Image: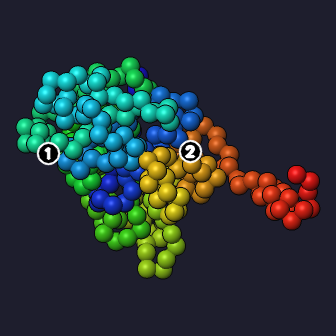
Amino acid sequence: MARCIAVASGKGGVGRTSLAFNLGVALSLFGEEVVMLDMDLVMANMDVITGLLNPEVTLHDVLVRDKSIEECVYEMNYGIRVVPTGMHFETLKNINTNYISWNKIINEIADYGNIFMLDLPAGIDSNILEALPADTEIILVTNSTMPSVADALKLRILLNEMNLDILGFVLNMWYEDNFLLSPQEIESLLEIPMISIIPYDREMDRALALGRSVVEINNTSPTSNAIMQLAADILGKDYRPVEPDKQSILNRIKKFVGMLPE
């Protein structure tokens, strides 16, 4: 049976979609068959982040133009599949989110993977939350700022009231600053376990610009190691952080100054 993991945030701009994408790639590197489903029908970004620009068929087309969901599943070179939402604003007015069966959509593409990463829209949308598969596991994403933590708390309260399963929260793009809330303070406020701290890392910006995953372009970066560790924890597997090859760097310097033969 496929496992559904939803990535949610109370506020936009906390890196939810980029985390969902990179976590999906990390899970695939552990041998899982991952399908990424962007559930934001208005401000979707999964296609942009994955480098899947101008896909021929999107979820909008499936919902209003009688296209099949199978036409909307794209295999990427990271070993994952992506279901893009698209940016067809002219079709959006014809979509009633109250009548979308996400369960039906997932069931129709169930053969494409064993883990479905669901990228939820930011904020509180009870229509989306109520439509999630019953066994969905939710990861709450926040930053250390007061607004993002406050919105995460509102969302956590709603999720608890709806009896939805929260795996915990991820403190994303974290860096130490006396004016920001500490990880311990955030955990105390949200009253759910912190399952990962993803440090702020310019390598993530570089990966986003290239339309690729940070775990691909630099597997030794702190962010890459943190995301791989999170994937391992979700799967109950072991992971050993990848360290930079300092010996190789030293040897290159030695060759440059003539201390080692070419």
- Cα separation, mark 1 vs mark 2, equals 33 Å
Amino acid identity at mark 2: Glu
Position of the N terminus by quadrant? top left
Location of residue 105 in the rendering, given as x and y in whole percent from the top left corner = 25, 27
- From the image, tell me which residue sits under label 2: 216
Location of residue 38 in the rendering, given as x and y in whole percent from the top left corner = 30, 40
Per the rendering, the mark at residue 89 is 1
Residue shown at 44%/54% (left/top)?
209
- Residue 14 horizontal side relative to residue 65, left or right: right
Location of residue 233 in the rendering, given as x and y in whole percent from the top left corner = 55, 43
Q: Quadrant of residue 11?
A: bottom left
In this rendering, is residue 2 above or below 7?
above
Crowding at label 2, few (<14), some or many (≥20) Cα neighbours within 10 Å?
some
Residue 220 can be seen in this image: yes
Query: Looking at this view, is 81 or 141 the one in front?
Result: 81
- Name the secondary structure under disc 2: helix
Amino acid identity at mark 1: Phe
Query: Looking at this view, is 8 or 25 the one in front?
Result: 25
Residue shown at 51%/63% (left/top)?
202
Location of residue 256 in the rendering, given as x and y in whole percent from the top left corner = 83, 62
Q: Earlier along the polypeptide chain: callout 1 or callout 2? A: 1
